[in-house]
Amino acid sequence: LDGLRWVACLHIVVLHMYKNWEGRLADFREWGQTWVQFFFLLSGFVLAMSEMAKPLDAPQPSLIMYVYRRLKGVYPAYLLSIFLHLAMFPDLTPFEWRALLPNLVLMQTWFPQCAMNSPHKSTCVQQVVNPPAWYLSDLFSYWFIV
């Protein structure tokens, strides 16, 4: 199952990196939404199976320890992505600087804030620093619910 998750994850990463595919690769891109849903479904299944495999009488970690263990695996890479973004695009607007804090603490989708760039285009907090990381923000809230 991890191999299938790896394939789905790779497709999602490539999909976000190369949005303007042409030719034969454009057909591959059309499957992007399917891979995202497949990744979410399979990840939920793997997470549920790992929790169900634990003995019922096993000690349960506190909420803080549970969230800490989950963050330990993803937060360093996430932080690196934010710092790389800042290094590559240092000229942030005031709105983007304000959006940085919710992004740093994985709350960019908890309190949506948007700014109008033009009459027909807006930019929201979760789309500023690392747009694909909306998933981590939602996952972070899920860990508190579980």
Image (spheres, helix red, strand yellow):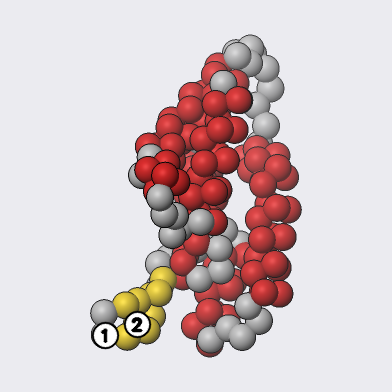
Give the number of the mark in front: 2 or 1.
1
Closest to the observer, 44 or 18: 18
Residue 122 at x, y percent in the picture = 35, 76
Write down the quadrant of residue 51 in the picture: top right
Query: For this rendering, which residue is in front, 52 or 126?
Result: 126
User: Which residue is most to the left?
Assistant: 120
Residue 43 left/right relative to 87: left
Measuring 38% from the left and 80% from the top, which residue is drawn there? 115
Left of 49 or right of it: where is 55?
right
* Whether residue 64 is situated above or below residue 120 in the rendered picture: above
Q: Which residue is mark 2?
A: 116
- The residue nearer to you, when weighing 65 against 41, is 41
Instruction: Inspect the image, locate mark 2, and give the three-letter code of the amino acid beneath it.
Output: Met
Residue 113 position in % (x across, y down): 40, 73
Image quadrant for the N terminus? top right
As helix, strand or loop, the secondary structure at mark 1 comes to loop
At 58% across and 83% down in the image, what residue appears? 92
Residue 119, disc:
1
- The amino acid type of the residue labelled 1 equals Pro
Count residues near mark 1 (Cα–Cα under 10 Å), then give few for <14, some for 14-19, many for 20+. Answer: few
9 sits left or right of 79 in the view: left
Residue at position x 50%, y 45% in the image:
12
Q: Residues within 10 Å of mark 2 (few under 14, many from 20)?
A: few
Residue appearing at x 53%, y 86% in the figure: 93
Disc 2/disc 1 C-alpha distance (Å): 7 Å
* Left or right for 58, reference 146: right
Q: Position of residue 30 (x, y in %)?
A: 36, 44
Regarding mark 2 in the picture, which secondary structure is present there? strand
Given contact means CB atoms under 8 Å apart, are the residues at marks 2 and 1 in contact? Answer: yes
Instruction: Return the mark for residue 26.
Output: none
